[in-house]
Image (tube, coloured by chain):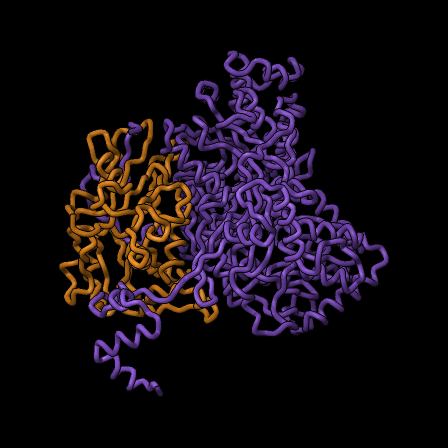
Amino acid sequence: MAGEKWGMVIDVDKCIGCQACVVACQAENNIPINTEDLYNQRRAVQWIRIERYWEGEFPDVKARFIPVLCQHCSDAPCEPVCPVFATYHNPEGLNVQVYNRCIGTRFCANNCPYHVRFFNFWEPSWPESLKNQLNPDVTVRSRGIMEKCTFCIQRIRRSTRDAKAEGRGVEDGARELNPACVNACPTDTLFFGDLNDPDSKVARMSAEETGEHGRGYHMLEELGTEPNVLYLKKVDKNAKEASHA
Amino acid sequence: MDLTRRKFLTLLGGSTAGAVLFQACGVPEAELLVEAPLEMPEDMVTGLDTWYATLCSECGNPEGIVVRVMEGRAKKVEGNVDYPINQGKHSARCEAALQGLYHPDRISAPLLRVGARGEGRWEEISWTDAIARMAHQLGQVQDKSSIVLATNPVGGHLGKVVERFASRMGIAHMPYETLDETNLRLSMERTYGLKAMPDFDIGGASYLLSFGADFLSTWGSPVRYARAYGQFRQGDRERGTHVHVEPRLSTTAANADEWVFVNPGWEGHVALAIANVIVERGLGDSSAAAALTGNGAVDLGRYAPERVADRSGVSAERIRRIADEFAGHPPALAIGGGSAGAHSNGLANLNAIYALNHLVGSAGKPGGVIPNPGPPFSDVPEAPARTSYADWRGLTGRMSRGEVSALLVRGANPVYGMPKVTGFEDALLGGRFNVPLIVSFASFMDDTTALADLVLPENHGLEDWGSDVPDPGPGYQAVGIRQPVVRPFFEGRGVHLGARSFADALMGIAQTMEVDLGLEGESFEDVLQAGARELFETGRGSVRANDFRAFWNGALQRGGWWDTTAAYSGPSLSPRQIASAPGEPSLGSGAFALVPYPSIGITDGRGAHLPWLQATQDPITTASWQTWVEINAKRAEEMDVREGDVIRLTASNGRSIEALAYPHPGISPDVVAVPMGQGHTGGGQYDKDRGANVMSLLDSLEDSETGALAWAATRVNIAKTGGWMRVPRFENTAPDLATDEDQHIIKLTAEDS
């Protein structure tokens, strides 16, 4: 089998909407503070976000949560439209954004059906003292650059390098390998690993859950983007195999 | 060899020379290969990191965390996998501790007020000067009991130091919480005979019935509960069923299989109606039923579902069905708290709810209520001391009569949390300088600190020592140890300025005043080590070593000490007669019931200075940075209220606040809900004068028995002010994607695979 293919499994039945993944991602990836102004300009950046959907009306009402992040599509609509090859598919199955190449055409964001690509409309800024917290492994993206979820590639790189130096493989589900959101999630909604390794948790879950009685589905799968993020259906005893768009 | 840059590059050019040079520097050849320029920029890995275990400092019930430190700076917080409470998980609040550490508004030296109180003019003074001034002023007070030390509820060894300081100095210690837990704590004592909070085995339960407690977002030990909830949903066992009873659709209600709307204050009646059905049909433990009712002395018939249905708003049929399910799916667990206990009948409500566990045999059993053993220390209290709202109302009276000579505050913000109608702030400031001295130990300006005469800056939790006996614990003895993971950020300001540990500051004051605290050693670290020595001498638990040094290092490395075999060994949790059946709640007057709720990020306001927490979306509304009013969408339409309309909420006591309307379909037409945490009159760039403080308009209602603040009992009238402001929210920031009718973002299944 050729190399790794990183993927994620998200069990929607466990997601409680607590936002731990969102803030973990902000901290790990040097995402600028989403100020009130940025929210109001609709320019808040959240590489992973929790969407909330209403169903019904009081008193028969449900609010349902789902984490949405870059689906790292195998057939990614964002990739072919980049005129400068800033967004490309790397050999490990990651949809990667090369900041140094990006010229900010925003074609990719326009073409992404999941709305998980974010444009830096402003130069990111932090009060001087808060810069002490910035993660040295992650570039701060400047104005005019597109950015998105990387599956915390810096963690993948660091843990693979460390494993290599110690002459071992990277352990499936290792804390140092997992993206920040996966480690944070208090309910274990998120799983990360190598889909090419048949023994990995995500590969086993994918195999089980995409079967006839499985709960697995891909978001907007009718678009044929072949995402590497597998969602597991929410269990609702009264469900009629459907919900909201 | 004189190695210039040019020479270096020349040498590097020749590959053999380069290799030799690097060999000489001790860099293995493999490193050079990894850093090859052919790799993409995202492949770069720089520097070495170290992870240190410590405790989170942002919540009331600290999680064990590990902090990534690079070149002396803290970079990232993650959960400590070993720590029994959270087992590697953490919340958004833990993460934001970093922003507290490097916050631009952190106070970096003792401040002396130079203008009028609250004017905000300060002068930096040295620690020696500050402590001398304080010691002098406190020394002059004849009746030392007129000095009040108000802290957050502090446990562990800090709790010990604070208690010792208060008792040896002869001053009054009054722990303060915005949402006081008096009722919950008393309920544990009355229902189970427990002083410390028990653990709720959510992961082991099959059926979970919760009342009011938003345990998945802010109530109790949310990370622990959320972790267990994941097990409850998709663990090794069959998927559990969760029914949540609350007047508001909270995060917990949204996650439940069934949300039951209840009129505020009637939760206890619903619980007793469920008990009534269980007893009547003989579904539960009959001996427990006899004990709970005192062999029939308490007439549960008064709480027959039909009698309760109208006023509680829960139909008799529904109550019967829930009772059937609750009794029919062992192990079943009932949890109550939050708004269910924040009424004039709050304690009785909680007692009724927790009594349900006796009826279905879940008290003291797996999948139910697991009692916690006492701490493994000889002189650390089982649970931190607490006071009720009534105590604070009493203090307000004493202050206005000039009977309080000094108020020392730490980790408490009563000026913010006390309902305005109580008159706390007026009593504190008063025309006649009622309280001659106000000292605040704080890292940041807040509403109370802004009024202080002297501010003594505290070390951040990540720069400090400490310990915590988790409360609630994990069902066995556990101790968390806090260690400094970085050197103090203000170290560069010298020994006379900068921040200090609160415990060390107290010890310094006592020393200056020549009061012997009878503590082991000179510093807080010594006190902590003496405590650790006690653990070492037990010779059991997760850390064992031949000598104390090794033990201490081991405990610091793992973030604490725990002994999974040291479970509760006290008397069994036998059912007691329900002492006081819940009477009718006394509510304020107004067209809408007001449900204030702690925000998921900034909670009761303690995290409002941290931008990450301010920016954290509320799960239900997706709003942030502001104060909004959740109002039923249809009702809003009738009232011609649109999202962003500025609404004035007025309580019957005359106080009002203004907040932005957020209509949604998930709230009762008779209820409005407002998040807590904004509207600070003192603070910094991220929290001051932002939004409105919902606590300020509350009626001065309290539990008739315990004096706890009935913060969910106020009713309000609402009116449009004519103003409009955009609600900063994430919802609909991206346009909807046109998809096929039958394609859904969240797919559902009735099957549990």
Tell me which corner region of the image, top left, top right, bottom left or bottom right, holds residue A59: top left
Front-most of residues B690 and B566: B566
Q: Residue at x 58, y 45 (%)?
A: B479
Q: Which quadrant of the figure contains the C terminus of chain B?
A: top left
Tell me which corner region of the image, top left, top right, bottom left or bottom right, holds residue B77: bottom left
Q: Residue at x 33, y 42 (%)?
A: A53
Tell me which corner region of the image, top left, top right, bottom left or bottom right, holds residue B744: top left
Which chain is in purple here? B
Front-most of residues B346 and B150: B150
Residue B649, image x, y percentages:
54, 48
Q: Residue at x 28, y 36 (%)?
A: A233
Look at the image and tell me whether residue B631 can be seen.
yes
Relative to B203, does residue B301 appear above or below in the rendering? above
The colour applied to the residues of chain A in this rendering is: orange
Q: Which quadrant of the figure contains the N terminus of chain B?
A: bottom left
Residue B533, image x, y percentages:
64, 49
Residue furthest out toward the right: B142
Q: Give left or right: position of A148 versus B268.
A: left
Residue B71, image x, y percentages:
45, 67
Front-most of residues B338 and B661: B338
Relative to B624, does residue B124 appear above or below in the rendering? below
Relative to B585, does residue A52 appear above or below in the rendering? below
- Say how many tags the image has: 0
Q: Give left or right: position of B148 versus A232.
A: right
Q: Residue at x 48, y 41 (%)?
A: B224
Look at the image and tell me whether residue A149 can be seen.
no
Residue B189, image x, y percentages:
65, 31
